[in-house]
Amino acid sequence: MKKFILGLMLSTLSFQGFAATRVITLVNHQYEGVKQWLPGTIYANVGDDVELHLINKKGKHGFRIKAFNIATEVGKKVVKLKFKADKTGIHKIDCQLHGAHIGGQFIVNGK
């Protein structure tokens, strides 16, 4: 009975057109001198609300997704970014502070 009620509630929310909120945690990591955000590839569906939690434990690093006008510096505190995934395609993630030493991609699937 509980599963039926939960399913009914979820289908009602979907029917009313609520967009999903995609929460993604990325951690800055260094391996053999190469700095990167892990996971290196993140995904969302077009129309999703996206909330990124950026964790960095050493120094200061940049995080940028130029296509969504996102650029921030991440120190030793968790940085949370919220935006709408409103552009389909493969979008570059890089560091605006240190050139190309941190790279990745944000893939937004169309519906």
Image: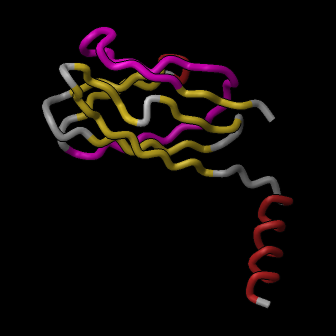
Residue 57 rendering spot, x and y as whole percentages: 18, 40
Name the residue: 28% across, 46% down: 78
From what the image shows, is residue 8 above or below residue 36? below
From what the image shows, is residue 1 above or below residue 53? below
Name the residue: 67% across, 21% down: 89
From what the image shows, is residue 42 above or below residue 16? above
Q: Is residue 81 magenta?
A: yes
Q: How is the image coloured?
A: secondary structure
Q: Nearer the viewer, residue 54 or 70?
A: 54
Q: Nearer the viewer, residue 30 or 42?
A: 30
Residue 86 rendering spot, x and y as whole percentages: 67, 30
Residue closest to the far front: 32
In screen coordinates, is 3 left or right of 52? Answer: right
From what the image shows, is residue 91 above or below residue 77? above
Number of residue marks: 0
Residue 2 rendering spot, x and y as whole percentages: 74, 87
In terms of image quadrants, where is residue 27? top left
Name the residue: 86% across, 59% down: 15
Name the residue: 67% across, 24% down: 87
In terms of image quadrants, where is residue 11? bottom right
Q: Is residue 61 magenta?
A: no
In terms of image quadrants, where is residue 94? top left
Image: magenta residue range: 77-105
In screen coordinates, is 40 left or right of 56? Answer: right
The quarter of the rendered structure image containing the C terminus is: top right
Residue 40 rendering spot, x and y as whole percentages: 44, 29
The quarter of the rendered structure image containing the N terminus is: bottom right
